Amino acid sequence: MKKRLLVVFIAVLMVVPFIRVAAQDQTIVEVAAGNADFATLVSLVQAAGLAETLSGEGPFTVFAPTNEAFAKLPAEVVAYLGMHPEVLTSVLTYHVIPGKVLAADVVAGEVASVEGDNIQVTVSDAGVKVNSANVVTTDIEASNGVIHVIDSVILPNIELPAVDPLAVSDNIIAAGSSTVYPVTERMADLFNQEGFGGTITVDSVGTGAGFERFCVNAETDISNASRPIRQEETDSCAANTRTPLEFYIGIDALAVAVSAENTFVDNLTLEQLNAIYSGTAATWADVNPEWPAEAIQLFSPGTDSGTFDYFVEEVFDAEETAILNAPGIQFSEDDNVLVQGVEGSQYAIGYFGYAYYLPNSDKLRAVNVEGVTPSAATAESNEYPLSRPLFIYTTASLLVEKPQVAAFTNYYLSNVNAQLGTEDGQIGYFPVSSDSLNLDKLEWLAATAGGM
């Protein structure tokens, strides 16, 4: 077990609903079985043959997901766990730590689970989290330990089957989001360097156009997306007997950027962004009377871009008419064109993925939004108002029918987190949580029926 951070748990009783049930003769399993909210958990514990273990002497501390928490898991993942008791056991025992830890004794840091992998405990004014799950009720006591209720399922490290790029060939075609493009391109380059004998084509055409090629034309194997797939796109996929399989591969802090020569704009609200990109504010002085009375030059991704869709959703409540009619606005599906446009004038403004801002940060300046600076921490917590998830899509049938697609997707999920970040050589997006990445891996295993 890694060294714990000795950060004392403070004021949790004020922010987490607190229930203390007197210690009783019932074991943890018996207490859980008597609570309808734990019906799914109890049935899985019984299916895995863990009831006797968790009824033993202990003591144990159990972070117990509710029925609603399990319902958040994709149905195919739940089915996969049911058919693979060893994986199910690993997941369930990851929710258990040795010893009886009451709320007043919680400390932030890493603690070893019974399963073996460490659980990350975070304590803040907002409450307590274990990995990405919130603790919603504390201190339900039993004769052999204590239960704390969490709102989502946490997952141990899931290992995918080893990939040998030399063992697969044929072609792979990926297309879609310009935001996700540098991630998939990097993963393709690394896969090629490992000896892949086929050809990987990665096209940057925008999320919408990518889904058209993936769903309507059924011509691509992987669709890069900076927004979730829409129902009409899913319907188009269904018409081609394709069922999209979503993998959450990164987090973007969408950068609202001005030229480095612009020394007056330091923060913008969503309301001000609305005024700027609707043309209601024609000059910077219209936004703030202390700023220059110079015309604002607008740069925006084009309408095929998922970045455009996301920005319109967040800033214009999904109504795109105003931004499309903004006087003088310049659209491009190429983020590098937008970067160059903003760099070229101290009165310009644009928005694009953080990975396009970061390598140009000597010529650009990212503006705070609603007083929050875009960063790894604020993107993951969603404190930054324009943080958003990034995805790749394929289908279970493609993974089964095309070994090269299964191998590349496996390689992608197994290695992508190391490629994301703000260090030299990394792509300027941020890794997803361990729970999200391990759920991706479980979805891959379920889709490929347990491996390649």
Image: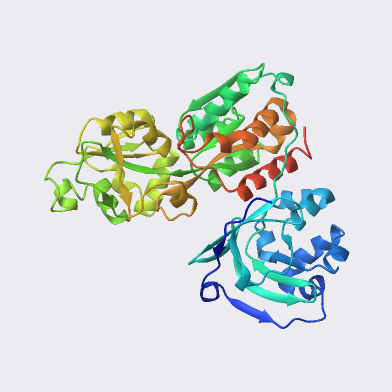
On screen, 36 above or below 425? below
In terms of image quadrants, where is residue 308? Answer: top left
On screen, 440 above or below 401? below
In this orientation, does residue 233 appear? yes
x, y (%) of residue 200? 59, 21
Furthest toward the top, the residue is: 197
In this orientation, does residue 215 appear? no
**Number of marks present in the image shown:** 0
In terms of image quadrants, where is residue 306? Answer: top left
Quarter holding the C terminus? top right
What residue appears at the point 26 percent right and 31 percent down from the top-left corner? Answer: 343
The image's colouring method is rainbow
x, y (%) of residue 73? 67, 54
Asked if residue 391 lies left or right of residue 348, the reply is: right
x, y (%) of residue 158? 71, 44
Closer-to-camera residue (197/164): 164
On screen, 75 above or below 46? above
In terms of image quadrants, where is residue 358? Answer: top left
x, y (%) of residue 72? 65, 57
What residue appears at the point 82 percent right and 74 percent down from the top-left corner? Answer: 27
